[in-house]
Amino acid sequence: MMERMEVSPGDARRGYEPLLRQMQPLYSKFMASGQVRWSAAHDRVAHLAHGWFTRCERSIDAIVVLDATQLAEQAAPIRRSIIEHVLALKWIAADGNAVLGTVARGHAFKATKRRDAVADAGWTSVDLDDMQETIDAIEADERDAHGDSLLHYTQRWRRHGDAHELPGYLAECEKAHPSYESAAAYFADAGGPVSLLTTPREPIWQVPFATTHLLEALLVMRGVFRPRPWKNELGAILDGYRNVTDAVRVQDGLTPVSWPPVRLDEDGPDGTDNSA
């Protein structure tokens, strides 16, 4: 069996590991602290924010486990889900409680499609009346439809994402669906006969991806709490992340990043955000 990508002790990428370990307990400790206060703009979507973050965090744990068991190539659908959930957290941080009606309408639409599929398949193990009661209880028709476009990744990305997210998302989609890219890891074509492989040609170390997306998710989640948590912890981790990333780029023959300023100011006494 092919080993995971070997990263030597002297490789600058090793600097991501301690940053990931520092971040992993932050959310669970905060939630157990008894000091959690959701902002007034997010209190009705607290369950969504928590669920999406937890899905993201546990998915990050999963890709690290897959990496340790030489299965990093199979993590593409999980990496895609992580990218999608970080973007969803940006949406919920920006739009707050207004997200609730849009998500409810999407839930009703998807539940209706599942009910119709069950009916078409003729399943007798599922009660269609119960499914319809669930759909009716959502009251989708009574909710504002103006945000429906944001149920789609591309529209959400155009509103709340940045240019650096889309290339990675599209690459993970290609690996997650049957495509040339999903097959390419398992054959080698050097201009001669194609060699068929049972393990991937280029296993990718998952820790840099995991560190990047957990840091981004935590930074976004600060916005739904009042006061905002982890100012000191994430300030130090953010500085370390930038230093490691620049060191990796120099090691790889690239120029350091021109980092945008990020302020982790506390909230004002009235609970408003004072950060630029």
Image (spheres, grey):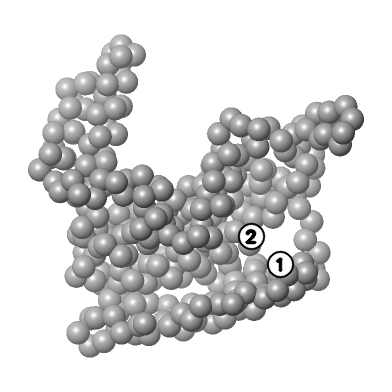
Q: At label 1, which amino acid type do we have?
A: Arg
Residue 13 marker: 1
Percent position of residue 185, x then y: 72, 38
**In the depicted structure, whether residue 223 falls above or below residue 269:** above
**In the depicted structure, whether residue 57 falls above or below residue 232:** above
Percent position of residue 54, x then y: 41, 56
Pointer 2: residues within 10 angstroms few (<14), some, or many (20+)?
A: many
In the orientation shown, which residue stands out farthest toward the left?
A: 142
- The answer to whether residue 58 shows anywhere in this view is no
Where residue 113 sits, quadrant-wise, is top left
Label 2, secondary structure: give it.
helix
Whether tag 2 and tag 1 are in contact, CB under 8 A, the answer is: yes
> Residue at left 12%, top 39%?
141
Pointer 1: residues within 10 angstroms few (<14), some, or many (20+)?
A: some
Q: Is 258 situated left or right of 234 in this image?
A: right
Distance between mark 2 and mark 1 Cα atoms: 8 Å
Which residue is label 2 attached to?
207
Q: At label 2, which amino acid type do we have?
A: Val
> Residue at left 42%, top 78%?
230
Percent position of residue 118, x then y: 30, 19
State which tag comes first along the sequence, 2 or 1: 1
- For the C terminus, the quadrant is bottom left
- For the N terminus, the quadrant is top right
Residue 171 marker: none
Where residue 195 sits, quadrant-wise, is top right
Label 1, secondary structure: give it.
helix
